[in-house]
């Protein structure tokens, strides 16, 4: 369970970090890094909330990851 908690913390730090970097202008929301890091954060947090059987937040992370994947694909096509 310690590994699952660590994965959850990594996701939390990534999510807050990416949001902060975007808000402060260090990373653009239209760059590839923004959705990639959001995808990794969603996967990490999804693992954590699934392990806790917190299924409403699992749905949130699935949608968060889906939006990130859509943005990655859109970036790759353009």
Image (spheres, rainbow, N blue to C red):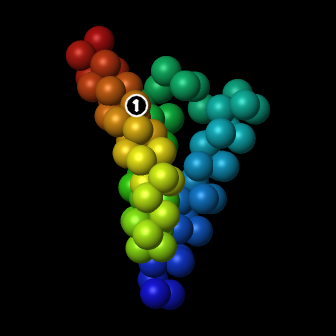
Left or right of 77 on screen, residue 30: right
Asked if residue 43 is positioned above or below residue 78 in the image, the reply reads below
Relative depth, front residue between 5 and 75: 5
Few, some or many residues within 10 Å of mark 1 (<14, 14–19, 20+) = some
Relative depth, front residue between 42 and 13: 42
Residue 20 place in picture, x, y as percent: 71, 41
Residue drawn where x is 37% and y is 25% of the image = 71
Asked if residue 18 is positioned above or below residue 26 in the image, the reply reads below
Q: Residue furthest left?
A: 77
Residue 52 place in picture, x, y as percent: 48, 73
Q: Quadrant of residue 21?
A: top right
Residue 77 place in picture, x, y as percent: 24, 16
Residue drawn where x is 43% and y is 58% of the image = 55
Q: Quadrant of residue 67?
A: top left
Residue drawn where x is 59% and y is 49% of the image = 15
Q: Is residue 41 visible?
A: no
Asked if residue 70 is positioned above or below residue 61 in the image, the reply reads above
Report helix, strand or loop for mark 1.
Answer: helix
């Amino acid at each position: 369970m310690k590994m699952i908690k660590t994965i959850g913390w990594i996701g939390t730090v990534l999510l807050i970090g990416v949001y902060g970097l975007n808000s402060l202008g260090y990373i653009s929301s239209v760059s590839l890094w923004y959705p990639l890091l959001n995808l990794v954060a969603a996967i990490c947090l999804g693992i954590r909330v699934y392990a806790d059987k917190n299924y409403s937040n699992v749905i949130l992370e699935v949608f968060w990851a889906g939006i990130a994947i859509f943005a990655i694909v859109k970036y790759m096509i353009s």
